[in-house]
Amino acid sequence: MDRALRERLESVLAPFSSFDRVRPFLRRRLTSIFGHVVSDRDNSLVTDLYRYPNTAEFRKMLVFLRANFEFVTLGDVISHFRDGAPLPEYPIFLSFDDGLRETADVIAPILKDLSIPATFFLTARALDNRYLFYGHRRSYLLTLVQTVEMQQSMRQSVGALLGLSEPEPTLQTICQAFRRLSVHESDDCARLDECAEALGVNWQEVLDAEQPFLSAVQAKALLSDGFSLGAHGTDHTKFAHLNETDRRRDLRRSLDFMAETFGLDDIAFAFPHSHKGVTRHWMTEQL
């Protein structure tokens, strides 16, 4: 961002620098906040995807939100939109996507301690550590190549798989090439897997060692603790990259999985990545 634009934005946003000035605009509006992971440790599967809060930051955030909003449950939200039931004056809905292990190990205990409700959206194939998202695969490989010493021959092999033309690729160019790979395109995903094989990485072994996702037992325990569960796709594929047939199939399989595994009736669905390409009308037709 150039300096002039930054200064202009700062001047426009200055009146709203205090939350007390913003809060009135949120009155009677449902505020929704979602996250993925909270942890005090480095996590190679997500480090290159997004910054995540540590436990102290998470507690501080929750205390602030609780002082300025009233947390509502998934049931409250469904009743509001389906039946017209009223919500509090400043409602806020908290959810977490992907079903990572930290959901049970870190997030839920803090929420229970503060008596705050939340909904966890689970991806069917990831439960019980049966599948690793391609975003996580790319992040893992990026962390790996930056923390181990690669011989020149290995850099050349990986560079060639990444389409680099230079005979002696540097670590920087290899990392840049990894980040250019789309986790939504099948050719790029195949290239990621080829690089993993060249680097001696077996994804099932990574899943077995890291155990990054919840087990079904842990997810059921979350239900028993009063939290809500929802669906988050079959394998975390972005719906905009699915054709109509596959889109319908993915949605139905995801919903059926949650119903059969957890005995849920009203199942909320959070789109993997985004709802781009999906209209409210299309979604209503499916349900």
Image (cartoon, rainbow, N blue to C red):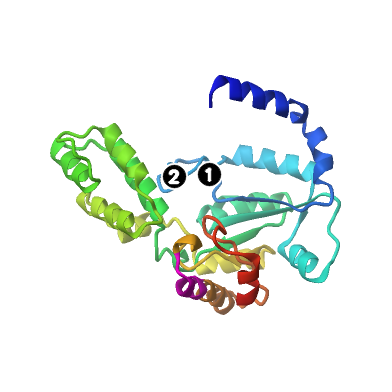
Q: Is residue 59 visible to us here?
A: yes
Q: Camera-side residue: 193 or 148?
A: 193
Q: Which residues are drawn in magenta?
A: 242-250
Helix, strand or loop under label 1: loop
Asked if residue 130 lies left or right of residue 20, the reply is left
Expressed as whole percent of the image width and height from the top left, the position of residue 7 reads 63, 21
Q: Which residue is located at x 53 percent, y 52 percent?
A: 102
Helix, strand or loop under label 2: loop
Q: Which residue is located at x 76 percent, y 53 percent?
A: 30
Expressed as whole percent of the image width and height from the top left, the position of residue 228 reads 66, 64
Q: Which residue is mark 2?
A: 43
Is-magenta flag for residue 97? no
Q: Which residue is mark 1?
A: 39
Expressed as whole percent of the image width and height from the top left, the position of residue 131 reads 39, 63
Which secondary structure dominates the residues rendered in magenta?
helix
Is-magenta flag for residue 245? yes
Cα separation between marks 2 and 1: 8 Å
Identity, as a three-letter code, of the amino acid under mark 2:
Asn
The quarter holding residue 60 reads: top right
Looking at the image, residue 241 lies above or below residue 200: below
Q: Are marks 2 and 1 in contact (CB under 8 Å)?
A: yes
Q: Is residue 201 visible to us here?
A: no
Expressed as whole percent of the image width and height from the top left, the position of residue 279 reads 61, 64
Q: Which residue is located at x 39 percent, y 53 percent?
A: 183
The quarter holding residue 88 reads: bottom right
Identity, as a three-letter code, of the amino acid under mark 1:
Ser
